[in-house]
Image: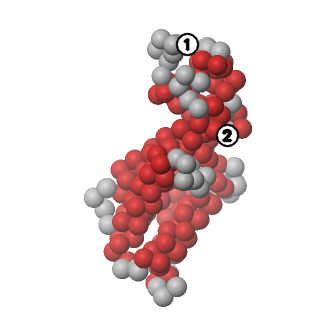
Amino acid sequence: MSPRAGLDKSKIVAAAVEIADEQGVEGVTLAALAARLGVRSPSLYNHIDGQNGLRTLLAVHGLNKLGDEIGGASQGLSGSEAIQAMGKGYAEFAKRHPGLYEMTLQAPDGDHPELIEAGERVLKLIIDLLKPYNLDEQAELHAVRGLRSILHGFASLEQKGGFGMPLDTGLSLQTTLEAYLSGIDKFRGL
């Protein structure tokens, strides 16, 4: 059986991203994807390895897009300016692509080298932004976890409408990151 003319992984990923962002991760099924693309579900197996393969493909795509976003936002900056720009880029990505963002949160397993590589790229970008703070390797990883927790928590609350008060969320994020950076020395010696 040959693949349908015009159907390829990039079209499949684009349609799956649309579904994820519109309906959430649970809405991304092979049946929903086939319906969106106007094909039968078995046609998708010529391009992806079932539901798990689709989710892995989306996670890789999402991590690559997130890496592009935070890398582009912080390019040419250093120190607190870079962290602020990266944080803003992170939150904006999560807001624009809520379903795709959710796909980036799974811990990569050893069976998917592309997923590991995409996750490590994002991790390296964040570690590089933390270099001016002169943390040792272990402290850097603790700092990354803390920063990721702040950004994920902020993005998740914002997505779910958890910031209902009439305050500038951008200023809230900026101030939260400033407070985090003012205490970054606490990660030393952990």
Q: Residue at x 61, y 14 (%)?
A: 39
In front of the other: 161 or 164: 161
As drawn, 74 above or below 41: below
Drawn side of residue 188 relative to residue 49, left or right: left
Q: Residue 58: x and y, percent?
A: 55, 39
Badge 1 marks a residue whose secondary structure is loop
Tell me the kind of residue under disc 2. Answer: Val
Q: Give the position of the N terminus as an image quadrant.
A: top right
The image's mark for residue 25 is 2
Toward which corner of the image does residue 49 lie, by quadrant?
Answer: top right
Q: Residue at x 35, y 72 (%)?
A: 131
In front of the other: 83 or 48: 48
In front of the other: 79 or 142: 142
Tell me the kind of residue under disc 1. Answer: Met
Q: Residue 184: x and y, percent?
A: 47, 79
Which residue lies under the disc numbered 1?
A: 1
Labels 2 and 1: the sequence-earlier one: 1
Q: Residue at x 48, y 88 (%)?
A: 189
